[in-house]
Amino acid sequence: MFSLHQLRCFLTTYEHGSLTAAAAELGYAQPSVSEQIRALEKSIGAQLFRRVGRGVVPTTVADTLRPHAERTLAAAEEARRAARSVMALETGTIRFGMFGTARLYAGAGLVADVLRQYPGVRVELIGQNSSDVQDELRRGRLEAAMIAVPQVSSEGMAVTPVARDELVYISADPTRLETPVTPQRLAAASLVMPETTWRADDSTRIILRQMLHETGRNPQTRIEVEDVETAVELVGMGMADSVIPRGAAEQLLPRLAPTAGLVALRPRQFDTLAIVHRAGATLSPAATLMIDLATRRIQSIAEPINPR
């Protein structure tokens, strides 16, 4: 039989494509990681990696093993959390996934909500983009999270929509804000868009691509940036326009682009925000608490779906 330690060494090596990098992340000597991989290969009866230069390349067997190893480690982590859940609510660390834009206008309030009830805990809000957060869920590093629905792969996940946040067009040119922005106008606009690292999976861009489908065009980005704050600042400078969630616009425009304004899209478009966790999982008291507080917090800001 193989051990959880062997699976952890295998997955880390798989992710990095390097025994040396895996050892550095795990805090072990490289020969120790190599030994664990060899022991796992002996247990399975097949080679998992081939050496290529200074790195390693996974075999077909490794590709097949990977999702099973992830589920096994996730189940073990869930068992560990369940055993320590009572203590965690008093003095431990509470971790919750929340993608960047929602965290921008709900994160601080959520942390304050938790600490008012449990002043002894340590709080971690994890993630920049919904796809980033979902990956943490899939690997078992998070129990639950709030992410944007268009990016959720529902396979193996329980998805509960809780609110929707309207997407709005922002510009420093008042003539562009006189009427709602149609697909034809949007297709011709010069845009600055955040989330460039996740541009293929970003929820807002997915919605805009669907909106522009009838025009046969995609949104034209003049500028690509990582964070929504930079995008809003550039809009305020008149460098480009953008489309962002209304909640973010209402938080950031007065501070970063006071001369800019917003207008709706036509037809109106919405990001749906959902609570997500692994299907069938027994959630710890800490995760249940965070789900409840995050839902209440986001529903006080965005338009509720099935309000509590």
Image (tube, grey):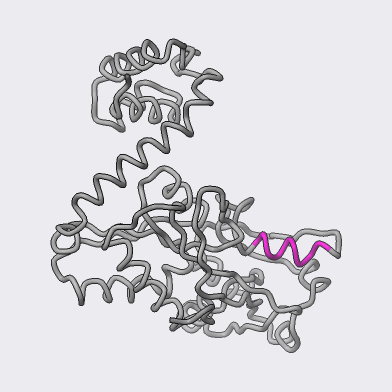
Residue, x 28% and y 76% (percent of image)?
113
Of residue 198 and residue 35, the one placed in the foreground of this image is 35
Magenta-highlighted stretch: main secondary structure?
Answer: helix
Task: Say whether residue 206 is magenta.
Answer: yes
Q: Foreground: 37 or 46?
A: 46
Horizontal side, residue 173 vs residue 57: left or right? right
Q: Is residue 18 above or below residue 83?
A: above
Identify the residue shown where x is 38% and y is 35%: 72
Closer to the camera in the image, 100 or 222: 100
* Magenta residue span: 205-213
| Quadrant for the N terminus in the image | top left
Total marks in image: 0
Q: In the depicted view, which residue is nearer to us: 87 or 194?
A: 87
Instruction: Judge whether 55 appears above or below 173 on screen.
Output: above
Q: Position of residue 62 (x, y in %)?
A: 49, 22
Residue 215 image position (x, y, % from top left): 86, 64
- Toward the bottom, the furthest residue is 178
